[in-house]
C-alpha cells in the first residue's frame, strides 16, 4: 500500500505538471497528462482492490475468532537444506498443519508466512 501510495503521488504530480498549461495544451502535454492520468487511475483501482481484499480477509478472520478456539490438529516445523538451480546450498523452514488424526496435511507455509499468520491471530485475539 505504501508503494502504491508513493506511485499515486508521483502520477498525481505528473498530472499537475502536464495539465497546468493555462488553457493551451500541445499534443505532447495532452499525451503526457493522459498517460499520468491512466497510471493514476490504475494505481487507485489497485489500492481499492487491495483494501477490499484486506477487509474481506479481516472479516473472515474476525468471524473465525468469534467462533472461539478449538483444536484443529498439529503444527509441525520442518527445516531442510537443499541445492538451488545455481548449485548453492540453501536452508529453509516449512510449517505444516496436520489434521487431528495425523492423516492429511491441512496447510503448508514457509516459516515467515506462518509467523505472519500467527501475528494476525494474536492481534485479532487481543482486538476482541
Image (cartoon, grey):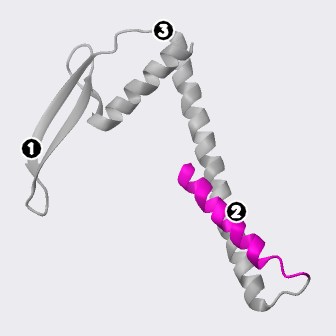
Residue 31, image x, y percentages: 72, 83
Q: Which residue is drawn at 62% across and 48% down?
A: 49
Q: Residues within 10 Å of mark 2 (few under 14, many from 20)?
A: some
Give the Cα separation between the discs numbered 3 and 1. Answer: 37 Å
Tag 1 or tag 2, which sits nearer the N-term?
2
Q: Which residue is drawn at 40% across and 29% down?
A: 117
Judge left or right: residue 24 versus residue 31: right
Q: Mark 3 points at which residue?
A: 68
Whether residue 81 appears in this view of the structure is yes
Q: What stretch is highlighted in magenta?
A: 1-22
Tag 2 or tag 3, which sits nearer the N-term?
2
Q: Mark 2 points at which residue?
A: 41
Residue 35, image x, y percentages: 68, 76
Using the image as rendered, state which of residue 74 and residue 3 is in the foreground.
3
Using the image as rendered, state which of residue 64 and residue 80 is in the foreground.
80
Question: Taken as a whole, is the magenta stretch helix, strand or loop?
Answer: helix
The quadrant of the image that shows the C terminus is top right
Disc ID at residue 81: 1
Tag 1 or tag 3, which sits nearer the N-term?
3
For mark 2, give the secondary structure.
Answer: helix
For mark 1, give the secondary structure.
Answer: strand
3 shown above or below 127: below
Amino acid at each position: 500500500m505504501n508503494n502504491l501510495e508513493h506511485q499515486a503521488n508521483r502520477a498525481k504530480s505528473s498530472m499537475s505538471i502536464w495539465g497546468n498549461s493555462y488553457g493551451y495544451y500541445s499534443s505532447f502535454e495532452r499525451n503526457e497528462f493522459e498517460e499520468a492520468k491512466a497510471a493514476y487511475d490504475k494505481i487507485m483501482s489497485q489500492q481499492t482492490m487491495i483494501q477490499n481484499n484486506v477487509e474481506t480477509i479481516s472479516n473472515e478472520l474476525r468471524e473465525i475468532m468469534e467462533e472461539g478456539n478449538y483444536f484443529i490438529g498439529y503444527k509441525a516445523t520442518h527445516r531442510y537444506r537443499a541445492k538451488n538451480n545455481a548449485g548453492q546450498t540453501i536452508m529453509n523452514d516449512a510449517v505444516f498443519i496436520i489434521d487431528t488424526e495425523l492423516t492429511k496435511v491441512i496447510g503448508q507455509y514457509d516459516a515467515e508466512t506462518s509467523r505472519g499468520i500467527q501475528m494476525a491471530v494474536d492481534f485479532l485475539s487481543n482486538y476482541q
